[in-house]
Amino acid sequence: MTDEVDETVEELSEEIILEENDEIDPIVILEQQIEELQKEKQYNTAEIANIRQRYARERNILVKFAGMNLAFNILPVVDNLEKALEIENNDSEKFIEGVNLTLKRLKITLENEGIVKIEALDAEFNPSFMEAIAAIPAPEGKNPGVVLEIIEDGYMYHDRVLRPVKVIVSEN
């Protein structure tokens, strides 16, 4: 550290115009160093503020358009539902077939986005993924604490619970 200070003092002393009989004033040199460091600090502070503003703008854009991919993938499902509603003569077989194909396409789209159904039937009750709506006595051959019936399906979004499975659980 002292070597750096000595080098800086030498550099600054060369910049100062001195008369031959004047001596180098270390206070003047230190004041110049302080002034340069203050300017550098101001520059760095401004640069940090700019980076923060740029990050906030980019984050807002990401949040704003985060659902764009999902929306793009759901549009064909909407188109299929509209076509199903346009079926003439109320042909119920074609209507049911169209709705089933649309549901299948929607499930595939959700899976591609990382949304998967939680399988819970006959599984051990897990409060991390499940919400017990009721508990009934365990039927013969069933252990207590096992899911007997699913009231409402639950879904995971990657590794987070999007909606817990609502279940009926067996008890003693």
Image (cartoon, helix red, strand yellow):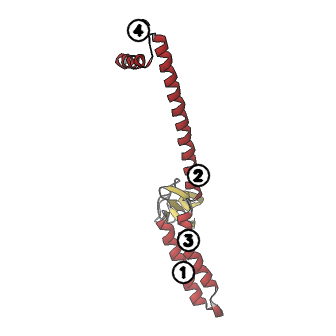
Pointer 3: what residue?
74
Which amino acid is tagged 4? Glu
Residue 60 has which mark? 2
Do tag 2 and tag 3 residues touch (Cβ < 8 Å)? no
* First in sequence: mark 1 vs mark 2: 2
Which amino acid is tagged 3? Ile
* First in sequence: mark 1 vs mark 3: 3
Pointer 1: what residue?
100
Residue with the most extreme left position: 3
Q: Nearer the viewer, residue 49 or 99?
A: 49
* Residue shown at 47% from the left, 62% from the top: 123
Pointer 4: what residue?
20
Name the image quarter holding the N terminus. top left
Image x and y of residue 111, in percent? 48, 67
Q: Secondary structure at mark 3?
A: helix
Label 1 to label 4: alpha-carbon separation: 97 Å
Q: Is residue 39 above or below residue 3?
A: below
Residue mark closest to the camera, 1 vs 4: 4
Label 2 to label 3: alpha-carbon separation: 23 Å
- Is 80 left, or right, of 13 in this rendering? right
* First in sequence: mark 2 vs mark 3: 2
Residue mark closest to the camera, 2 vs 3: 2
Image x and y of residue 19, in percent? 44, 10
Q: Is residue 19 above or below residue 130?
A: above
Label 1 to label 2: alpha-carbon separation: 38 Å
Q: Residues within 10 Å of mark 4 (few under 14, many from 20)?
A: few
Residue 5, image quadrant? top left
Is residue 65 visible in the rendered structure shown here? yes
Which amino acid is tagged 1? Asn
* Residue shown at 61% from the left, 89% from the top: 92
Q: Secondary structure at mark 1?
A: helix
Residue mark closest to the camera, 2 vs 4: 4
